[in-house]
Image (spheres, rainbow, N blue to C red):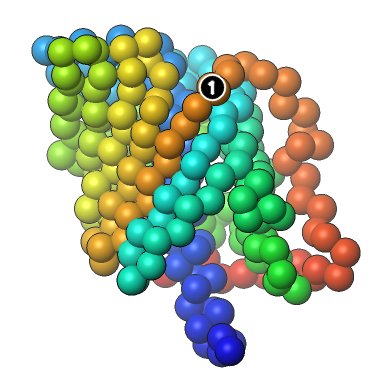
Amino acid sequence: MTSNLEKTVNRQRELIRWRFLIAAVLAFGAVGELRAQAGMSAAQVAARVDRHYNALHSLEVHFVQTYTGLGMTRKESGVLLLKKPGKMRWTYTDPDGKLFVLDGHDGYFYSPGETEAQKVDEKKLDDLRSPLRFLLGHTELEKELTGLHVSCDGGGTCELSGVPKGLEQRVSALKITAAADGTIRLMTIEETDGVTNQFTFSGEAGNVPAPNTAFVFLPPAGVHVVEGDPPV
């Protein structure tokens, strides 16, 4: 039986990973106009990412998330809806009922079977060093990521990688793989403790309808919303 301490630790780790995940969302949505070509510099690729994201209004895409670490591997899937500025909804279909919603002010984290949903003020999740600022629509990847690097294959697929500033103690690499047409196929977050979160994306659709009601968290019956602790 899982103790209350173990549940608290797991929730803290989940909140920390969402910080990295949000950074990935930006990177994913932002690379839509990237022309991945061999010989392009990391700065050129980052500039294309910036220009595209700052012009993007909304995004919907299917995802498969693979978590590896701490002696376990877990695969989950669902649909991501993103709306500028700072709104997102991760609706999981496997496991059915898992949800993360960021309404532009607060983040809500809920896992099926729990009697509580965690609410965290966006300001507590964010600081000037955090990748969360990307969601404000002022993307500057070259400034936000250290050790920025790009590698391209002969078919036009590129991998852009770097480390989010201020998170060097937690993230060893954030990697984005894009096809020649700019569609993101794969995103990987490698943490310094050996944990890896990998997201495979498909069916990307840009500037889709995204009503504000989609980003309102409605707790399931019997579930209480409680103030959560920010990542530490």
Looking at this view, name the residue that lies furthest to the right. 221
Tell me if residue 64 comes above or below residue 74 in the rendering: above
Q: In which quarter of the image is the N terminus?
A: bottom right
Looking at this view, name the residue that lies furthest to the left. 39
Residue 34, horizontal then vertical, whole percent: 34, 14
Q: In which quarter of the image is the C terminus?
A: bottom left
Q: In this view, does 180 lie to the left or right of 120?
A: left
Q: Residue at x 22, y 12 (%)?
A: 155
Q: Is residue 23 left or right of residue 172?
A: right
Residue 175, horizontal then vertical, whole percent: 28, 38
Q: Residue at x 16, y 31 (%)?
A: 149
Residue occupied by mark 1:
204
Task: Tell me where residue 216 sits by quadrant.
Answer: top right
Q: Can residue 8 be seen in this view?
A: yes
The residue type indicated by label 1 comes to: Glu
23 vs 114, nearest the viewer: 114
Residue 196, horizontal then vertical, whole percent: 32, 55
